[in-house]
Image (cartoon, rainbow, N blue to C red):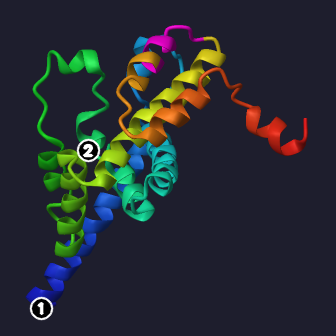
Amino acid sequence: MTDASADDTARDRGTAGYLFEMGALKRAKRSGWWITGVKDPETIAEHSWRCAVIGSVLALMEGADPARVALLCTFHDSQETRVGDIPWIGRRYLDAASNETVTADQVSRAHDRVAEGIKAIVAEYEQGDSLEAVVAHDADRLECVIQGLEYLQQGYPAAQEWVDTTRARLRTPSAVALGEAAVGMPIAEWQRTYLGG
């Protein structure tokens, strides 16, 4: 085996290892909801998936690139395989590495184009300057609002504070409008609307 093929094999393994690592997000629960009393909160991957869908919708409403927003949303919490989902109260006591630093470590053995691409995605989200990053941040917040509303309807009254404080942080007109529309809506409203009930 030549040095080049050995390096390619190592990069293939490093990239595949990153994919396995991302699978941990399917099992890791969002810890902030435990503080509000939710016994079995959604996983980080479940949150990220709906965040990407919401981000695409908000992007279409705001005139941003929906594919780019969905990409930013997909990777926005990927660092939590290494540092966990640190709730806001926990951040008061911890000095965690930046998401850019964690991401650089996560992809350090991946193919160069993969590593550079993922680092750029995370950096754009963290810097928050582009329209797509602003929309992606609002998608993250709106997903928390909607999840909180679902938990409220499932009997977790402490979720109300999360809904209220997170709604207050929405920035784009579309996110504000959708957040307002969601409040007070039954979580099964979509069934009644489309099934003629």
- Residue at numbered disc 1: 2
Where disc 2 sits, the SS reads loop
**Given the current orientation, which residue lies at the most extreme bottom position?**
2
- Number of residues whose C-alpha sits closer than 10 Å to that of mark 2, classed few (under 14), some (14–19) or many (20 or more): many
Tell me the amino acid under the disc marked 2: Gln
Q: Is residue 194 left or right of residue 33?
A: right
Q: CA distance from mark 2 to mark 1?
A: 34 Å
Determine crowd level at label 1: few under 14, some 14-19, many 20+ residues with C-alpha closer than 10 A.
few
Q: Is residue 104 above or below residue 145?
A: below
* Residue at 30% from the left image edge and 42% from the top image edge: 81
46 to the left or right of 87: right
Task: Give the answer, above or below, for where 31 lies relative to 110.
Answer: above
Measured as percent of width and height from the top left, residue 173 is found at 44, 39
N-terminal-most mark, 2 or 1 = 1
- Position of the C terminus, as image quadrant, is top right
**Left/right of residue 116 with respect to residue 41 in the rendered view:** left
The boundaries of the magenta stretch are 156-163
> Where's residue 184, x and y in %?
65, 20
User: Which amino acid, mark 1?
Assistant: Thr
Q: In this image, 32 relative to 3: left or right?
A: right
Q: In the image, is residue 88 above or below residue 158?
A: below
**In the image, farthest residue toward the front:** 173
Farthest residue, direction right:
197
The image quarter in which residue 195 lies: top right
Q: In the figure, residue 186 lies in which quadrant? A: top right
**Which residue lies under the disc numbered 2?**
79
Q: Is residue 55 magenta?
A: no
